[in-house]
Amino acid sequence: MTEKTLIVLLDSGDTIIDEGTEIRDDHDVVLSGDTLPGAADMVKSLASAGYRVALVADGRFASFENLLSQHGILDLFETMICSEQIRASKPSPRMFKAALGALDLSPEDAWRCVMVGNNLSRDILGANQLGITSIHLAWTERYPRTPSRLEETPDHTIMLPEQLLPLLEELNRNLEYGTSRITGDSVSALSDAVSEPVQ
């Protein structure tokens, strides 16, 4: 399998795991939770397609081990960066720089990365600040779907996990043709399954 140029950073809550189903212990560690419909298959399809995948999420390391193990996808993540380890939460650049470092990348490699998350003020803002292509997975209404400021505007928006791989395949093709940070204007040929970026 040929490794893709594009590298995928994924959030957990309401990106892979349905936050409304999480069961926590007295120490705020998540013991179990259901995935979003199609989310486990999304992660498997990314790995099968040759994408390097990293978790970048706010919370306890044990929570993510429990959740990803429960659904058989823990070993598909090359690294897991969580706020408990870094002692900072998104949108802090420390979270994203830690992920890049764990992937043997530098901040200058941000153009090769995408951040996929549900939270505009954390995932999208943090990615945008470092020049990482931002993808808003707007599956839930628990968090705002409209940016409160320009810096929270995602490069792309999708509604369902299964829409991620077709978008990434198009973005990766553009990267391999020498384009750096890809925005919606440069991927107008995407299928109708992928929504337009927020304007």
Image (spheres, rainbow, N blue to C red):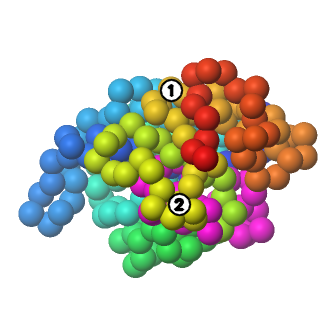
Give the labeled residue for mark 1. 162
Q: How far separated are the C-alphas under marks 1 and 2?
A: 23 Å
Image depth: mark 1 or mark 2 in front: 2
Amino acid type, residue under disc 2 in the picture: Glu
Quadrant into which the N terminus falls: top right
**Magenta region: which residues?**
102-129
Residue 63, percent from left and from top? 28, 55
Q: Amino acid at mark 1?
A: Glu
Q: Looking at the image, which residue is at 66% across and 21% down?
A: 191
User: How many numbered discs?
Assistant: 2
Q: Is 67 on the left-hand or right-hand side of 165?
A: left
Is residue 37 rendered to the left or right of residue 49? left
Say whether residue 2 is visible.
yes
The x and y percentages for residue 110 are 71, 61
Secondary structure type for disc 1? helix
Left or right of residue 193: residue 130: right
Label 1 vs 2, first from the N-terminus? 2
The residue at 70%/41% (across/down) is 184
